[in-house]
Image (cartoon, rainbow, N blue to C red):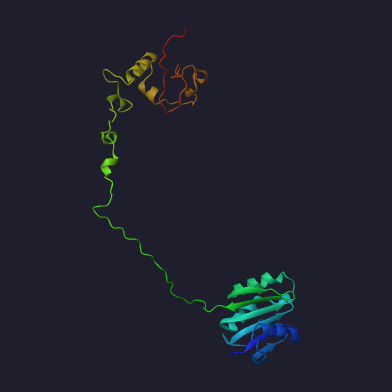
Amino acid sequence: MAPALVITDEVSLPLHAITNLSKEGLNQEEAVIITQCELLEGKLPFGNETLDSVFVLCTKSENLTDSWFKDINRVLKPGSKTFFQTNLDEQIKPQIERKLLISGFVDVEAIKNPQSIQIKGKKASWTAGSSFPIKISTKALPKIEITDEADLIDEESLLTEEDLKKPVLPIVGDCEVGSTRKACKNCTCGRAEEEKKVEKLGFTAEQINNPQSACGSCGLGDAFRCAGCPYKGLPPFKLGQKVTLANDFLAADI
């Protein structure tokens, strides 16, 4: 059986500490004790994975360095445990737990003790880079049997007479084709009326359908147009958009 290791930053190991460690499974006859561990500068004189347990008794927070936690993990066998005990302030407890987790320990747990802070952890049984298969249980889908006696719904029965009627598409007349075409005979879409309005005003179709302005003020209305403006008399419009003429545009004011 590999020896257990007890390290402390004190000059000697207190008797009460040995009693507490015995409760955690320390066998004094097989234990190796190192005092004033800070002199080792975080490097333990043991090979990799050679110890069954490491017990740490610390009285100074500056000795709880990351290098100590990493080296303790190095010398422990996979699945072996470590035990920390200190009389420092309670604020040190979450720091020890965090450093144990970061160093690769699992099952980190604080032990309730009114006299001191005690925390234990276990080195993971697996090593970095190891792999293992994951068994995924799959459940078979229930089988559905369809027989002739099964109650099936006829899709055709879901349609009504209105659904079966052929849709009536709107008829597109010649007047709807192209914006520059002239109104056809018997025009009913209103193009002929618009053309008559334009002819009476003396404007061209291009001026009505695609009005442009060199000064940028022609579309604002007569109040902003100059004396020689070609759009004089038309209602305000947006440049590039067809000028809309009201039905009573040419009606005389009463």
Residue 93 place in picture, x, y as percent: 69, 71
Would residue 219 be found to the left or right of residue 143 on screen? right
Q: Which residue occupies the foreground of this view, 239 or 70?
A: 70
Q: Residue at x 27, y 44 (%)?
A: 155
Q: How many marks?
A: 0
Judge whether residue 14 can be spotted in this image. Answer: no
Where is 51 relative to 64, above or below? below
Q: Residue at x 39, y 15 (%)?
A: 201
Q: Which quadrant does the N terminus fall into?
A: bottom right
- Image-quadrant location for residue 206: top left
Would residue 138 be found to the left or right of residue 40 on screen? left
Residue 181 place in picture, x, y as percent: 30, 24
Residue 63 place in picture, x, y as percent: 71, 78
Residue 241 place in picture, x, y as percent: 42, 27
Q: Which residue occupies the foreground of this view, 234 or 39?
A: 39
| Residue found at the very far top of the displayed protein | 254
Q: Which residue occupies the foreground of this view, 228 or 174?
A: 174
Where is 209 relative to 120, above or below? above
| Residue found at the very far front of the displayed protein | 149
Judge whether residue 55 can be spotted in this image. Answer: yes
Would residue 42 be found to the left or right of residue 171 on screen? right
| Residue found at the very far bottom of the displayed protein | 29
Q: Which residue occupies the foreground of this view, 199 or 25?
A: 25
